[in-house]
Amino acid sequence: MTQQVLNATVAPLPPGETLTPAAQPRSKLPLASLMLTPSVAVLFLWMLVPLLMTLYFSAIRYNLLNPDQTGFVGIDNYRYLLEDPAFWPAVGHTLTLIGSVLGISVVGGLLLGVLFDQPFAGRGIARLLVIAPFFVMPTVSALIWKNMILHPVYGLWANIFRAIGLQPIDWLAQYPMWSVIVIVSWQWLPFAFLILLTALQSLDQEQKEAAQLDGAGPIRIFVYITLPHLSRAIAVVVMIETIFLLSIFAEIFTSTAGGPGTETTTLTWLIYSIGLQQFDIGIASAGGVIAVVLANVVSFFLVRMLSKNLKGEYEK
């Protein structure tokens, strides 16, 4: 009797008949959407409220030194910022910093990944030492480089130069931008190394062995097998690092403070100096809006590049 009831329960419907709406299973999608609504609303407000406030302040005259002078100014804050002699050099310094750090971290991470993909004694300890800088706070990292490595009197390089009979160099004064690039690259190189090493370890070794049997040397294997396999990982590294490098601040604040002069003044530092040193919230907010637009434009092209890369990988 029980078996007959079960058979009747799972028996197919006669041809031409369908389940009535009351008999159809209820969808769980509305309930799931309802449960996600509070989180989505909080995240939306978390992003929207600061952006709207920044847009509002960028359209009014608001200087903390003259709080009585207020009023709507339209795009005057943007025009003043774009005509500031320090603005376009700051944009150039930002692009120089991003491009240089990306080049050093990607090339260095690729070389280190190929090296650590080979078995050798003490590889685990060496790998730990390589990734250690990534876990150091930016301010601490900048202090280490400023006072222990690049200092013209007590630094490591100063002692090495004096030991070989050369005059020590004040790196932060004579080569400020390249000093900042080295500091930031030291932090982000381990990130690129981890991503690229993980991608290298996922490479099918049979392809390399087949290429070796066909007479291909190490360079050809690297160019025609390893690099195409790493293209997606390199795109991920470039996208993530670019987004974070657009907001580099602590390293500049600790090491050079945007100087000497404006040699290391990036867009982030310029906004900080206008808002918290000159107390002009209106112009600083205009700079913040410009920085957001620039970041979104860069992110748009990076995401498109990554999506095309992923599409190409899936088509293969």
Image: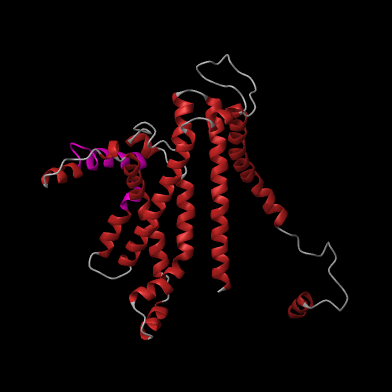
Q: Residue at x 39, y 69 (%)?
A: 201
Give x and y (percent) for residue 284: 52, 29
Question: Picture quarter containing residue 207?
Answer: bottom left
Question: As displayed, is residue 13 above or below residue 28?
Answer: below
Residue at the location (37% across, 81% down)? 216
Q: Residue at x 65, y 22 (%)?
A: 72
Q: In x, y percent, where is residue 93?
A: 43, 41
In the image, is 172 to the left or to the right of 101? left
For the rendered model, the colour scheme is secondary structure
Residue at the spot 41% in from the left edge and 35% down from the top edge: 265
Going by the picture, which residue comes out furthest to the right?
A: 16
Residue 98, given in percent of the width and then of the height, sits at 43, 48
Q: Of all residues shown, which one is farthest toward the bottom?
A: 213
| Residue 160 falls within the magenta-colored stretch | no
Q: Do we see residue 290 in this rendering?
A: yes
Which span of residues is magenta-colored? 132-155
Residue 146 counted in the magenta span: yes
Residue 3 lies in what quarter of the image?
bottom right
Q: Nearer the viewer, residue 163 or 288?
A: 163
Image quarter hosting the N terminus: bottom right
